Image (cartoon, rainbow, N blue to C red):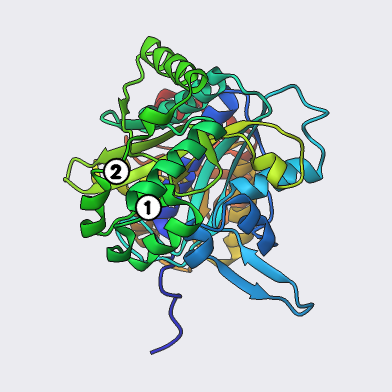
Amino acid sequence: MGIINVKGTHDIIGGEAENYSYVENVMSQIASFFAFKQVRPPVLEHSELFVRGVGESSDVVRKEMYTFDDKGGRSLTLRPEFTAGIMRLIVQNKLLPISELPLKLYYCGPVFRYERPQLGRYRQFNQFGVESVGHASPYADVEVISLAYTILQSLGLQNVTIKINTLGDEASRDAYRAALKDFFKDKVENMCEDCKMRYQINPLRILDCKVPSDQEIVKDAPKMSAYISEASQKRFSQVLESLKAMDIPYEVDDTLVRGLDYYSETVFEFHYVSNKGNDYGAIGAGGHYDKLVHEIGGPDAPGVGFSFGVERLVSVLCDDGLLEQADLPLDAYVMPLGIESQKNALMVANELRVLGYRVDMCYDDVKLSNMFKRAEKKQAKLAIIIGEEEIKNEAVVLKNMETKEQITVSLEDLGNKVDEILMEKGE
């Protein structure tokens, strides 16, 4: 067997690649409607960034990062998530002092995590997300949740479940950690090794354990809601009231803590089960953070963000028949009659491409009937035929593939005629 792709990665080809572009373009456009601006941080970062930013108790840092020493002996990591890198970008480029707050950014690109490949989940996958940084208003949280919900609705996903919770402020979390420490102290020895580690570093992470026997123990653990400060409870109520006023459905889940250490106050997840019954779990998630910018070396500046896994979104959209995994149809297919006509065919194709049309041409010296079969397979709306006679007369034969009407058009008038025909077709 020859060389194959690395386990947990996948090739995105043909119509599937078109689907990815479509989904990413929809998300980017909606983010721009909300006045978010695109940034593109590097894939490689210093490993320290994720230890400080994501948190050493998170599974991402402890088990899932692709980390290596470069030739200069520096520890580098392929980014396992975007948020820490975005904060580094903001701090390093001093964006907060020169921006109206909140600073609103969006991103899209590959991330890398060494985890078990499963439905819609890979070791290299793509994330789209946003960060709104520099303002503590609860309405910044609402705006970000609204943006994410608008994206899902625009993609056609109607039965989205938004799970939401509050982790409270720092005092609330300190009190809750102490309560969890006390609750689990006589139980942790009978729990998984991960939970034993989480107990020492951050007992909130135990609530995120996926081991069934541990989940049974977690059911009786104290609830976060009992330790939320009055100020945090008021803030959370403002978030919920605003979501209700905007007709954005949600359910409060007091076990939701999210898997990254930097979250505080509002956290949320978007859950979906496809029409085929495939439970994709959380197809997107995010939350508020208070200390992350400071941890990266910047000022005290709160923020809120979310991310979507593009692979999961594409999978669930295909499951529900909301995407067709097929190549986009051509506006025109150019057919040179003989090798000597190919130069002119390419010139015609390029002129139409400059006008904004999707055009391909035949490079093989085959019969005209074979070229028409190729045009039909490519779902071309128009066929453009160029032979010796057409070259001499500076014209082409233009055929409407739907009506079968065929006319001769001068090269000078070709663009206008293509515009006319395709406008009549509603293209």
Q: Which quadrant holds residue 160? A: top left
Pick out the residue farthest to the top. Answer: 245
Q: Is residue 168 visible?
A: yes
Query: 18 or 179: which is nearer to us?
Result: 179
SS under mark 2: loop
- Point out which mark residue 221 bears: 2
Horizontal side of residue 83 vs 420, given as left or right:
right
Q: The residue under label 2 is which amino acid type?
A: Ala
Sequence-first tag of 1 and 2: 1
According to the image, label 1 marks what residue? Answer: 206
Q: Up-down: is 65 above or below 397?
A: below
- Label 1 vs label 2: CA separation? 10 Å
User: Looking at the picture, how far across and down is residue 64, in whole percent?
Assistant: 48, 65
Q: Which quadrant holds residue 213? A: bottom left
Q: Up-down: is 338 above or below 378?
A: below
User: Looking at the picture, how far across and down is residue 97, in whole percent?
Assistant: 82, 29
- Residue located at (56% from left, 34% from top): 170
Query: 292 or 327: which is nearer to us?
Result: 292
Q: Up-down: is 13 above or below 207?
A: below
Q: Quadrant of the N terminus?
A: bottom left
